[in-house]
Amino acid sequence: QVQTMESGGGSVQAGGSLRLSCLASGNTYGRSCYGWFRQAPGKEREAVAVISTRDDSTYYADSVSGRFTISQDNAKNTVYLQMNSLKPEDTGMYYCAASYSSDYCRSHNFAGFGAWGQGTQVTVSS
């Protein structure tokens, strides 16, 4: 089973940038994609970005498209989320997770993801 651990969160002002990292460990063989999800207080967990481990194809939520970039370094077993032009509405707990299902990767449905990390808090002030 793969495990993930996030880092890189913090507090920034609107317009600032952060880079989140997700270190994967354990048996990473066979996973189809990694995803970054976020959850704000009182809101459902939502997919922010997903990257395929097969062909590096990506998905972005409309709300972050053009501002966030997901990438992966296979040699380091690390997935990154570069977040630029941050907005107060980006505030939340950010989680990294993996999926072994290409169907769930395409649908970016969090129900099909596992190996959730403990999360890293991102707070954007106006």
Image (cartoon, helix red, strand yellow):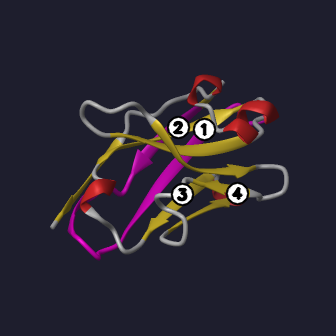
Q: Earlier in the sequence, mark 1 or mark 2?
A: 2
Q: Work out whether residue 33 or residue 8 is closer to the camera in this orientation and state it.
A: 33
**Residue at numbered disc 3:** 62
In space, the residues marked 1 and 2 are separated at their CA atoms by: 6 Å
Marks 2 and 1: in contact by CB < 8 Å? yes
Q: Which of marks 4 and 1 is nearer the N terminus?
A: 1
Q: Earlier in the sequence, mark 2 or mark 4?
A: 2
In percent of width and height, residue 3 lies at: 56, 32
In space, the residues marked 4 and 1 are separated at their CA atoms by: 22 Å
Q: Is residue 45 left or right of residue 66?
A: left
Q: Which of marks 2 and 4 is in front?
A: 4
In space, the residues marked 1 and 3 are separated at their CA atoms by: 30 Å
**Residue at numbered disc 4:** 58
Q: Is residue 20 magenta?
A: yes
Q: Which residue is drawn at 50% across and 30% down?
A: 116
Q: Residue at x 72, y 31 (%)?
A: 104
In space, the residues marked 3 and 2 are separated at their CA atoms by: 25 Å
